[in-house]
């Protein structure tokens, strides 16, 4: 189990440094690691954990806590796995947030000293499209996992249209989609 904790710390520390633009940018990497490479969770579990982390207050990267718990053996019916799962969650969260936070503190200190320099503006302009691409990549990963047929595609498209054309709270849209799904699939 100790080696698993080290794997969690290593993986989430590396992901921590690549989360430019927020937690959504690492979703494709999280999916690749948790579902494809290590088989800690299934596609459906990934989608469920992603949904829970989006609906819960706090940063999207809280999905790492849930993945850390699942990787260390936590499931709804598991008895006696709470302590290892809790430790897995704590290691995942610490590894996800501490490295990038420390880097941010160091960079912010120097960044202010060079405010307005041409190279600084060039870096800012370059990071914007990279971040947008990373966010689109995470959207694509979640869509591939969530869309299982034409009906789920229609539900997703309607949700997208409502979000783009109105100021409806996304949680309300998710609740309505859940009710519609429950009615259709029982």
Image (cartoon, rainbow, N blue to C red):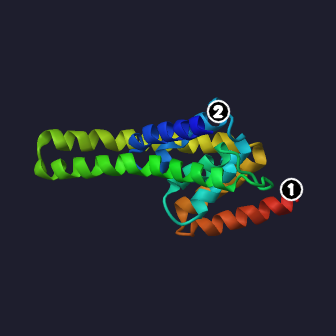
Q: Residue furthest top?
A: 37
Q: Nearer the viewer, residue 98 or 60?
A: 98
Query: Which disc is residue 38 wearing?
Result: 2
Tag 2 secondary structure: loop
Query: Which disc is residue 73 wearing?
Result: none
N-terminal of the pair, mark 2 or mark 1, is 2
Q: Position of residue 60 (x, y in %)?
A: 52, 55
Q: Quadrant of residue 176?
A: bottom right
Task: Mark 2: give few (<14), some (14-19) or many (20+) Cα within 10 Å.
Answer: few
Q: Position of residue 128 (x, y in %)?
A: 33, 44
Query: Which disc is residue 185 wearing?
Result: 1
Up-down relation of residue 176 to residue 77 (above or below)? below
Q: Which residue corresponds to the image point at 25% horizontal and 44% vertical from the top-left?
A: 124
Q: Position of residue 147 (x, y in %)?
A: 71, 44
The quadrant of the image that shows the N terminus is top right
Q: Is residue 63 visible?
A: no
147 left or right of 165 in image: right
Tell me the CA gap for discs 2 and 1: 31 Å
Q: Is residue 124 visible?
A: yes
Report the mark closest to the observer, 2 or 1: 2
The quadrant of the image that shows the C terminus is bottom right
Q: Nearer the viewer, residue 9 or 157?
A: 9
Up-down relation of residue 167 to residue 5 (above or below)? below
Q: Nearer the viewer, residue 172 or 114?
A: 114
Tag 1 secondary structure: helix
102 left or right of 113 in image: right
Q: Position of residue 55 (x, y in %)?
A: 60, 63
Labelled pair 2, 1 in contact (Cβ < 8 Å): no
Q: Residue furthest right?
A: 186
């Amino acid at each position: 189990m100790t080696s698993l904790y080290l794997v969690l710390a290593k993986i989430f520390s590396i992901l921590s440094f690549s989360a430019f633009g927020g937690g959504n940018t690492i979703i494709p990497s999280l999916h690749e690691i948790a579902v494809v490479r290590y088989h800690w969770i299934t596609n459906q579990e990934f989608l469920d954990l992603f949904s829970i982390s989006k609906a819960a207050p706090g940063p999207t990267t809280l999905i790492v806590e849930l993945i850390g718990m699942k990787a260390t053996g936590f499931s709804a019916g598991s008895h006696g796995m709470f302590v290892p799962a809790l430790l897995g969650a704590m290691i995942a969260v610490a590894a996800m947030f501490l490295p990038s936070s420390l880097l941010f503190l160091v960079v912010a200190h120097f960044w202010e000293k060079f405010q307005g320099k041409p190279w600084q503006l060039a870096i800012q302009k370059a990071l914007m499209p990279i971040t947008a691409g990373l966010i689109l990549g995470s959207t694509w990963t979640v869509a591939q996992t969530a869309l299982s047929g034409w009906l789920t595609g229609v539900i997703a498209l309607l949700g997208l249209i409502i979000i783009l054309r109105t100021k409806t709270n996304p949680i309300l849209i998710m609740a309505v989609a859940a009710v519609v799904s429950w009615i259709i699939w029982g």
